Image (spheres, grey):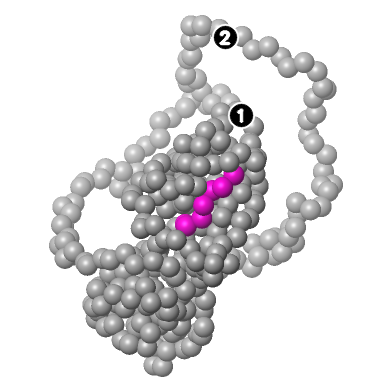
Amino acid sequence: MAEKRGCIIQGLFPKLTFFSLSAKKYIHEHEATIEIQDSDMGLTFFSGSSPPRIQKIDIFSYFFGWLFVGDWIVQIDKRAIKSAEDFTGATQHSGAQPKSLLIRFRRDDYFKMATLKVAEVTRKPNRVSVFMQIRWREDLPVGIVVERKGANIMVASVESGSIAAQNIFPGDMLIDVNGKEVNNDVSAAKKAIRQSIIEKKNVVLKLERDVTPLKMISTPADDVLAILKRQRGFWKRRSKFEPIEEEEPGKPKRVYHVPNVESEPLPVDDTGKKLVATPSRDGGTRTEEPVETAEEEPATEEEEF
């Protein structure tokens, strides 16, 4: 399992954007109480941003699902946060018990993704067309990485903790941008998206998504289903059985370490019969077969939007 990343400063701060009065109407401050277990916050901030602005959120971060990429951390427990160092100092925790943090953050609600329509694709079962509208600013990437896949453009990955992660999924095919087909031209698709953002126009993407239902590996037997049905919600009901063994409350017993303890394997089982070694079974001796080396696939062209 991947390790949770701590708070680090990485990357270049995007070009400074001076918000007009109309832009400020989208920026609001919110509060959230978040429980932490240690000091590894799993956040990456844009270098030089003040208040610190989130560039990446690790999927194992305590803030995952609460904060988004692009949010500013303004206060922690009523303490003003002006830099990444302030954030690190305010989130130090080494105790055994969880600690609650009152986070005040600033969010630009101009950033928005909305699904306009979902329609079935003709002559393609289990595939749908998704029309997605995006409203964005220049100072943040959209948060998706695409690659050329045959005659199409496929979403290879989506930035965790971003708005895109709630709307666009790996494996989605990008069909057109603002009504114009992009085929497999990754650069042209990126240029069309960025140009609309620069001109402060909404971007409409047409995506094609595989919605094939997942197959059940196996169906439980009838008697198993009957037991599961009969025991449904067992944790909500008081058990009719009494505990087999109860101990009187008292002081815990002291345990002493005894050095040089010797052990002797028993030659017989519980009934007194002599133990017999387990015989080797067929197939126990395994020979290694030569493994064929797979040919490497050519590198694909990837671009982040």
SS category of the residue bearing label 2:
loop
* Front: mark 2 or 1: 1
Q: Is 199 placed left or right of 287 in the picture?
A: right
Q: Is 150 placed left or right of 210 in the picture?
A: left
Q: Is 105 placed left or right of 300 in the picture?
A: right
Where does residue 53 sit, x and y in percent of width and height? 47, 51
Please name whichever residue, 185 or 203, is drawn nearer the observer in this view of the structure.
203
Quarter of the image where the C terminus is located: bottom left
Q: Is residue 3 above or below residue 56?
A: above
Please name whichever residue, 188 or 131, is drawn nearer the observer in this view of the structure.
188
SS category of the residue bearing label 1:
loop
- Residue under pointer 2: 257
Q: Is residue 44 above or below residue 153?
A: above
Q: Is residue 305 magenta?
A: no
Q: Residue at the spot x=51%, y=23% of the render?
A: 268
Please name whichever residue, 133 or 40, is drawn nearer the observer in this view of the structure.
133
Q: Is 63 placed left or right of 250 in the picture?
A: left
Amino acid at pointer 1: Ala
Where does residue 197 sit, x and y in percent of width and height? 39, 73
**What's the CA distance linking mark 2 and mark 1?**
26 Å
- Residue under pointer 1: 96
Q: Residue at the spot x=27%, y=69% of the render?
A: 147
State how many labels appear: 2
Q: Is residue 138 visible?
A: yes
Amino acid at pointer 2: His
Q: Which residues are magenta?
A: 69-75
Please name whichever residue, 144 or 247, is drawn nearer the observer in this view of the structure.
144
